[in-house]
């Protein structure tokens, strides 16, 4: 009952926790164990919902979480039940549940015309009923070290009989008494264990686990948005939003887009200051999309989906591939500053810096290779990040030695055309000394 961010608690809710042995000490995964358990368990009669799920770390342990918001609890509950059935029909979903469980059957009372004519109100009638069945403290006194309360209420044998309601005398505002049955009428209605609110409005969350090997949360959300949720909005006059991991992932991706823009701008400004030029940093940073292409191909080769940790790997990869590009471009600029022709400098830079670029890349790839093939379940979440860096770096290294010299050649041809119009460029004053050997 406490497996979600909005847990269900109450006297009508129970839970059983099963602790398994350490992941490295067993051959069965949590998902396999839960699937086998779910197949063997039959829901007993009278149980509204039976959910079996593995506990997960993080602020939200459910993959899919849809929040329905409305004004009437019964309409929200009906929409939640219909949405839950739609989610259960999607292959790869399990443990579908909502956090608006039904409670005990309730007695709803209202005044009769006779009760209203006698001067009774809903508030006064409710106060007398509360006093009769919950009691009212009429006196407190000290008995030695103890404080004693005197509470007046109906005897327990009468409280446990529904018939006592009809026989309960109700005091009238003018001082007389009347049977409860003559001043109020009753109806029966299914209540709710707990009413939850979001932003001041009544809400219910429908959540589920999703098997990533069968489908994805994004695909389910897109399908629900186009069909089921659109129908629920029209039928029940409710609003909806995707919460849980989906919302946090959207917020994280938004922050990462901002961080990526700031990071690339900082890299460009640093390179522009080092090279004293606005054109050379563009050539150096051209290695970044090469690395990202390799990272995406690496995930495809490993049969993995892109995750948040994969994107973190992209950030680290960007800095590494830029370093390799700097090695090649700086050596080329040094050769040009020493008077070497453009074509000869391109060939010499690619040949002389080949070993430096390869050593920089291969040492990093070699350090990440053991993690790529790690079988421990404790390290599985790190594999996407290692895949991004290792495959992206390997792919970018090959392209840097081919594409960057080609871009330098195009850049030189462009500058040659400008110099023909009287524009010149000086290298010696801005390029630090670089050794010719590695």
Image: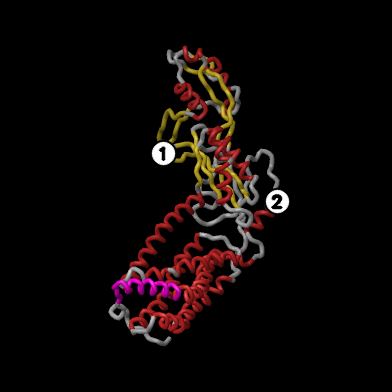
Residue carrying label 1: 144
The image quarter containing residue 409 is bottom left
Instruction: Give the left or right position of residue 74, taking residue 137 as reference.
Output: right
Instruction: Determine the residue positioned at 64% across, 54% down.
Output: 214
Q: Nearer the viewer, residue 171 or 113?
A: 113
Q: Residue at x 66, y 58 (%)?
A: 32
**Residue 234: image x %, image y %?**
54, 34
What are the residue bounds of the magenta stretch?
Answer: 405-425
Count of numbered circles in the view: 2
Q: Reply above or below: 190 against 352.
A: above
Q: Residue furthest front?
A: 420
Numbered badge on residue 39: 2
Q: Nearer the viewer, residue 27 or 354?
A: 354
* Picture coordinates of residue 264, whole percent (x, y): 39, 64
Q: Is residue 133 above or below residue 120?
A: below
As drawn, which residue projects farthest toward the bottom? Answer: 437
Please tell me which residue lies in front, 320 or 164. Answer: 320
């Amino acid at each position: 009952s406490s497996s979600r961010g909005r847990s269900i608690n109450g006297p009508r809710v129970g839970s059983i926790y099963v602790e398994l042995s350490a992941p490295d000490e067993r051959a069965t995964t949590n998902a396999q164990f839960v699937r086998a358990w779910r197949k063997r368990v039959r829901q007993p009669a009278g149980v509204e919902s039976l959910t079996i799920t593995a506990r997960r770390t993080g602020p939200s342990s459910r993959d899919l979480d849809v929040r329905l918001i409305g004004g009437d609890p019964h309409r929200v509950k009906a929409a939640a039940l219909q949405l839950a059935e739609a989610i259960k029909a999607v292959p790869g979903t399990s443990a579908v549940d909502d956090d608006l469980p039904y409670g005990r059957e309730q007695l709803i009372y209202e005044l009769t015309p006779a009760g209203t004519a006698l001067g009774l109100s809903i508030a006064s009638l409710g106060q007398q009923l509360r006093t009769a069945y919950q009691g009212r403290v009429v006196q407190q006194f000290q008995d030695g070290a103890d404080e004693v309360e005197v509470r007046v209420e109906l005897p327990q044998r009468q409280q446990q009989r529904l018939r006592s309601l009809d026989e309960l005398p109700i005091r009238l505002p003018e001082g007389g008494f009347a049977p409860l049955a003559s001043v109020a009428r009753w109806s029966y209605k299914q209540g709710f264990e707990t009413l939850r609110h979001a932003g001041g409005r009544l809400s219910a969350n429908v959540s589920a686990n999703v098997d990533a090997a069968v489908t994805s949360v994004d695909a389910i959300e897109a399908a629900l948005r186009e069909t089921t949720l659109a129908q629920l909005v029209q039928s029940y006059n409710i609003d909806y939003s995707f919460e849980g991991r989906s919302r946090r992932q959207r917020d994280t991706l938004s922050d990462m887009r901002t961080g990526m823009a700031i990071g690339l701008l900082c890299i460009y400004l640093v390179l522009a200051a080092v090279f004293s030029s606005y054109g050379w940093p563009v050539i150096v940073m051209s290695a970044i999309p090469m690395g990202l292409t390799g990272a995406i191909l690496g995930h495809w080769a490993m049969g993995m989906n892109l995750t948040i940790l994969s994107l973190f790997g992209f950030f680290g990869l960007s800095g590494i591939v830029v370093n390799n590009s700097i090695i090649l471009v700086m050596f080329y600029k040094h050769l040009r500053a020493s008077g070497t022709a453009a074509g000869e400098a391109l060939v010499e830079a690619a040949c002389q810096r080949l070993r430096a670029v390869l050593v920089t890349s291969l040492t990093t790839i070699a350090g990440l290779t053991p993690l790529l093939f790690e079988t421990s379940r404790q390290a599985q979440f790190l594999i996407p990040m290692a895949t991004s860096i290792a495959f992206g770096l390997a792919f970018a290294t090959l392209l840097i030695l081919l594409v960057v010299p080609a871009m330098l050649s195009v850049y030189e041809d462009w500058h040659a055309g400008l110099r023909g119009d009287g524009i010149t460029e000086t290298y010696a004053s801005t390029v630090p000394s670089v050794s010719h050997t590695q």
